Image (cartoon, grey):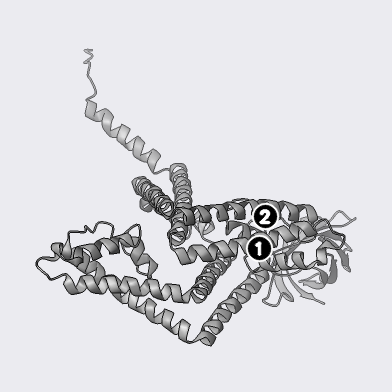
Amino acid sequence: MKVTSFRIPRSGLIAPAIGLALLLLLSPAFSQDKKARCEAKKEELAKLEKKAGQLSAFVIPPVRTAQIKLSRDDLSLLNNAMSELSSVNWESSPPIVELLYAVRTRGGFSGMAEQYDSTANFDNVRADDKESLRAFIAATRSAVISRINLLKSFDENPDSASVALRDSQTKVEEQRAELARMKCDETATDENDPATEKSKKSPCDLKKQEIADLRGKEIELRTTIDEVDDWIGTTREDLGLLNHVMANISDPNWRATEYRAKVEAIFGRSPSLTIFAERYGLKRDFDDIQRDDANAVREFILAVRPFVIKRLDRLLYLRDNPKAARDELKGLQNQIDAAISELEKLRCDETGKQESVCSMEGSWTQYAAGLGRSTWHVISDGKAIESGLGASTGTASMTKNVMRIEWSNSNGWSGYYEWTMDADCQKGTGTLVFKSGGSGSRTSTVEHN
């Protein structure tokens, strides 16, 4: 028999190689790894955007002045509380009580620390634990001092604030470009996938975000009320510049008129036209506009001027109606208090997840079909004792609104009850499952006595 030798064409090797590569890229492990890297990059970008937003506020003198005052007040509060920790009745001393009230209105110990860019987690701090309280005060005080020093340096050298802002914005753009190169949005996600569900914010996180947003509005409104005359003056200056440029923009010789100087003045009011617009609530990118492009400058003015006029009207209203301004501020404070109360009702644990909604403590009467009734007595540590039926003992647990009792008795029987509680946490329906001594399961109901 004649054996014919042959050679596989290169194209015959390339296709399987490509297929293998695609298989790896589309595999669940690769997809999950990419998702994790994308989430980490997005988190990093969010931190940089927060920093840039903070600096964009700090370049404005009235905001900077208000922030210095707030930081100094907090530093005094922390110093006074630290001094009181050495006293005998420190828990009831006014400085400690005042500090704990401030902590409560700012989303907890970690929330107050985050206000000063502290990354430490203080969710385990207890108001009755002197040492953990001392650690919180010491760390937060250092962060407050750093904030004060930063703001004072901006006051002494305003150009340094603009430089810091530009550097921060550059980092944001670099991160955005890197995130775009990662093509995270092309990663398909299944809304029914448990991994996707876990990535969504919990009710606790959403409520904390709501409180942070409300607190930001409160600080902004308080600053505006306190510095309203300064803000009116600044806004009128901005509006005057915009009006003057718009009035002269059709002049054929505009480059030789005052217009050019006014355009330069507009560009000099903020590190960029985009930031200028953001100060008045308009979020659009104007960074590509050139000073010599009359049409582009005109479009910018037409876009931003209505927002400036609206802000001026708002400022004049707050100045001329002080009672309405105070009522509005009080309304925000009431919303914050209500949101904090709702957060407390969610019973969030230190990881940001919701703790058990229902309480398992007390006496519960259950009925198992075909077996009869018994009463379970449950205490806070989960110990459970049964009266009736097998006189079993066990361990109870409550996860959100699902109550479970793992039980056993001296006769060698064991199993568990599991009930889903109603909205009032007083009644539940579920199942009795046998592990030993019996087999199968029985329907069961339970009611709090």
Quadrant of the frame with the C terminus = bottom right
User: Where residue 434 is drawn, which disc sits there?
Assistant: none
Point 61% across, 53% down: residue: 145
Residue that label 1 marks? 108
Left or right: 189 in relation to 94: left
Q: CA distance from mark 2 to mark 1?
A: 8 Å
Element under disc 1: helix
Any part of residue 401 in sight = no
In the rendered image, the vertical position of residue 47 relative to residue 259, given as above or below: above
Point 44% across, 51% down: residue: 45
Left or right: 94 in relation to 389: left
Q: Position of residue 16 (x, y in %)?
A: 31, 33
Disc 1 residue crowd, few under 14, some 14–19, many 20+, Cα 10 Å = some
User: Where residue 122 is drawn, which disc sits there?
Assistant: 2
Element under disc 2: loop
Q: Quadrant of residue 117?
A: bottom right
Quadrant of the frame with the N terminus = top left
Q: Position of residue 347 (x, y in %)?
A: 68, 66
For badge 2, the amino acid type reads Phe
Q: Position of residue 281 (x, y in %)?
A: 38, 70
In the rendered image, the vertical position of residue 162 relative to residue 441, given as above or below: above
For the residue pair 86 and 34, the one nearer the viewer reads as 86
Point 78% across, 71% down: residue: 370
Label 2 close to label 1 by CB (< 8 Å) = yes
